[in-house]
Image (tube, rainbow, N blue to C red):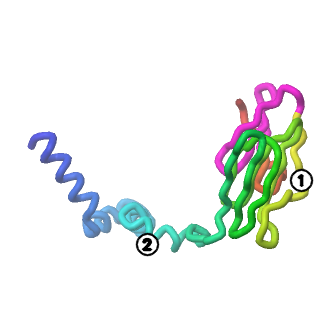
Amino acid sequence: MNKNEILKTINKLSNNAMFNVSLTSRELFHTNFWAWMLRKYPKVFTPVFYLEYNKKNKIKVLQKGSQVAVKFGNSISHFTGTLIGFTSNAVFIKNGRTVHVLVEKGGSVSNCGRNISLMSNDNVVMFGNKVGIKRGSTIHLYDEQGKPAGTRQA
């Protein structure tokens, strides 16, 4: 068998439901099958497992100069600072020595009530759905509500 024939066979097997069901004897059969369904039909099955996947009011963010426009549904809010990052539930904006944590409340985006204070040499980066503040060799993580969420080594 040449390389092209092998690749065609692999492709046929990876797209075959019965082949993927046959792999279920290896371990948790339903997990393997759902994983295949998610890969094969992501638009159909992703909303089944992630209920907010098709949420109409997703947060959208645009940085222009020192202004950050945050859109949620039909509401647009403007903030001053540098966009650090955002998730489906929160927006992190650095302004001076403060990271503002913005969340959706009542159909618009506003400060969650918890800001993260920075020291002069702190570096701010996103880690998945958390914001990380690098202080020396330690990264302090904060969740989408601005609450401490652990540490990790830099």
**Label 1 residue SS:** strand
Report whether 104 appears left or right of 2: right
- x then y, percent, for residue 107: 77, 71
**Outermost residue, front side:** 65
- Residue that badge 1 annotates: 114
Label drawn at residue 44? 2
At 76% across and 55% down in the image, what residue appears? Answer: 144
In the image, the segment drawn in magenta is: 119-141
Q: Amino acid at mark 1?
A: Arg
Local crowd size for mark 2, using a 10 Å CA cut-off: few (<14), some (14–19), many (≥20): few
Q: Amino acid at mark 2?
A: Val
At 74% across and 45% down in the image, what residue appears? Answer: 131
Q: What is the magenta segment's predominant secondary structure?
A: strand
**Label 2 residue SS:** helix
Residue 130 in magenta? Answer: yes
- x then y, percent, for residue 39: 39, 61
Q: Quadrant of residue 74?
A: bottom right
Q: Relative to 152, does residue 111 appear above or below in the rendering?
A: below
Q: Relative to 87, does residue 118 appear above or below in the rendering?
A: above
Q: Nearer the viewer, residue 142 or 43?
A: 43
Report whether 99 appears left or right of 88: right
